Amino acid sequence: MSSNRRIKVLVAKPGLDSHDRGAKIIARAFRDAGMEVIYTGLGQTPEQIAVAALQEDIDVLALSILSGAHMPLFTAIMERMRERGMSDILVIGGGIIPDEDALELKKLGIRAIFGPGTPLDEVVRFVRENVN
Amino acid sequence: MFDKLRLKEVIEEEERWDKTAVPRWLEAHPERKSEFLTSSGTPVKRLYTPGDVEGLDYLRDLGFPGEFPFTRGLHATMHRGRLWTMRQFAGFGTVEQTNERFKYLLREGETGLSVAFDYPTIRGYDSDHPMSLGEVGTCGVAVSSLRDMELLFEGIPLDRVSTSMTINGPAAMLLAMYIAVGDEQGVPGETLRGTTQNDMLKEFFAQKLCIFPPEPSVRLVTDIIEYCTDRLPMWNPISISGYHIREAGANALQELAFTLADGIAYVEAALERGLDVDEFAPRLSFFFASHSNLLEEVAKFRAARRLWARIMRDRFRAEDERSMWMRMHVQTSGCALTAQQPINNIVRVTLQALAAVLGGTQSLHTNSFDEALALPSERAVMVSLRTQQIIAHESGAADTVDPLAGSYCLEALTDEMEEGAMEYIDRIDGMGGVIPAIEEGFFQREIADASYRYQREVDSGERIVVGVNEHRVEEDWLPTELLKVEKTAERDQVARLRRLKADRDRKKVKGALDKLHDDADRGGNLMPTIIEAVKAYATLGEMCDVLREAFGEYRELIVF
């Protein structure tokens, strides 16, 4: 992307999981890094997230989940995005996600999964280096 | 506490030492950091002396255990008499699996049950609701109707156990189901023992599992307090919770202050309802987190007891001493567990549990070392329960009452905790109380700032977390037997719910739900109506839908 445009990130919390500490921290880290950040708030369905991603014309979708429901929810989100032709968006995830699930999620097109203890700058750097 | 002249001498000597001996030593041996802080940001001094507790009045501020202001403990002999309740939170998969886990824990010597419900249940959705997809039985057990509750407690006589239920928005419905199971077992409400968390205020800014807006939420909380005061005298209708506030990112001081502010709001609501303070206040209970900073945590627990006793006596004019008791449950910190080198978490849990015991808790949950990776496996749960038993029987910490009292450092930290919490409470009062403060986003902002600051400190290395930003290893030793919830749990649960919906007396269900709607509009205590609906096998989702219509739904205020 051209360097004069700010990276636009949607931080989303799918499903019923209410652990939003990480989502809020990462949203703030993106903002402090000069990106434009929208945070959906809790309780978003895959459909709502895909619609928000389309309407807001985002570059990056950051999904956060700690409830264990990542497989069905992330899969549904990726399907909804594909249906709308949003394959150019960089999708990343974070939360309590076992390694074997992370491998599966990468096959779906989620580019990186960040677990507990990941430094914020590492996530910011990854986004900068991989955004389209 | 000290002879005035001798104290003056001590203070002068300390000044001399500070000006001469310390700089001399520092020249060749600099300290590790320019500033040492507690998690709450309070500076920790190099040394504490009698000068730091100059204003401490033993009888006024500490007193004796079992007596006002209860700083030293609620009971005269504390853990020498009865150990704290070892209560491990459990619940996952199907009701049958959770029932088995309960029986396992009871066999292993646990003395109280604690139920974790899954997200759909907590948010008032049935297992077959579209929002429940993927969440059924994942973070806890699904209970959509009385039928599920019957199976959950099958073979467990309710007059023999005490049961804590971590439930807030739909607390009235789950308590009604428990009462109904008691009825079926022939156990009357008068003998039911346990706790409903039923603390909605902290949901709006910490745990964020809300259904209805704040005002009707507090109405339901108060309905439960009123009903239990009348009919379930041994039940704790509420567990005013700092745990979630802390997990959301607050520091220890904020946890203490915001929890007490919530407590004040509930007492005010019950008084407005026309209850007498000494009728209901003895059954109010509290729930705190315990982190690894041992001294800060012990100070927090002691300050909490003293402050609550003073608030109840001076602000609410309570006369019964039990109204001034802050009975507490403590859980070690989930967010302090690391996914890196997880076996180290056993040590963290030990420190945190020790702080709770030294702080005089009535009840304790210890986390399992694998919980930053998954729900705890059976072996990890066993280690965490054994940790409590080792503290109880081997450490000596339970053999004398409030053993850290009189430590200059600890007493100074306790005073600072109390003062800091009072400042926050005054600010919240100034905003018009907890609900206006929630609507302004005050708590949300305070917590978001504290959690972001903490993360930045870890990232910069200012704050060391062993295994995460220091002392890392290339190859982590990972536990191999992580618990995985079987995918069939959701399917089985949904199938049972569908069968129930087909089999029950539909007319009866409809009548009960219509009555619930009418009563919600009319005002008055909803508990009896909800118990009727539960017994007609109306589902949790159906009852909550009725109330969503009557009360509206809460919309989150987004602050980050």
Image (cartoon, rainbow, N blue to C red):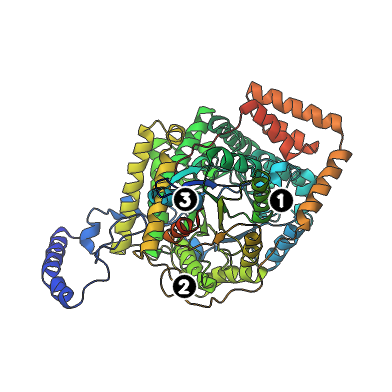
Q: Which of B144 and B171 is in front in this view?
A: B144
Report if the CB atoms under discs 3 and 1 are less than 8 Å apart.
no
Observer-side mark, 1 or 2, equals 1
Percent from the top left, x then y, of residue B468?
45, 68
Residue found at the far front of this picture:
A2
Give the chain of mark 3: A
Looking at the rendered structure, whether the residues under marks 2 and 3 are on a common chain is answered as no
Could you tell me how far apart the alpha carbons at marks 2 and 3 are, in whole angstroms? 64 Å
> In the drawing, what numbered circle is on residue A1?
3
Q: Nearer the viewer, residue B99 or B107?
A: B99
Give the chain of mark 1: B
Amino acid type, mark 3: Met
Residue at image coords 56%, 77%: B477
Amino acid type, mark 1: Val
Residue found at the far right of this picture:
B503
Percent from the top left, x then y, of residue A26?
46, 52
Q: In this figure, which residue is indicated by the disc labeled 1? A: B136
Q: Residues within 10 Å of mark 3 (few under 14, many from 20)?
A: few
Report if the CB atoms under discs 2 and 3 are less than 8 Å apart.
no
Q: In this view, does B173 lie to the left or right of B2?
A: right
Q: Quadrant of the N terminus of chain B?
A: bottom left
> In the drawing, what numbered circle is on residue B222?
none
Looking at the rendered structure, whether the residues under marks 1 and 2 are on a common chain is answered as yes
Q: Which of B133 and B514 is in front in this view?
A: B133
Q: Residues within 10 Å of mark 1 (few under 14, many from 20)?
A: many
Instruction: Give residue B443's quadrant in the image.
Output: top left
Q: What element carries label 2?
A: loop
> In the drawing, what numbered circle is on residue B396?
2
Is residue B68 something one can see in this rendering? no
Q: Quadrant of the C terminus of chain B?
A: top left
Percent from the top left, x then y, of residue B356?
47, 61
Q: In this view, does B322 lie to the left or right of B419?
A: right
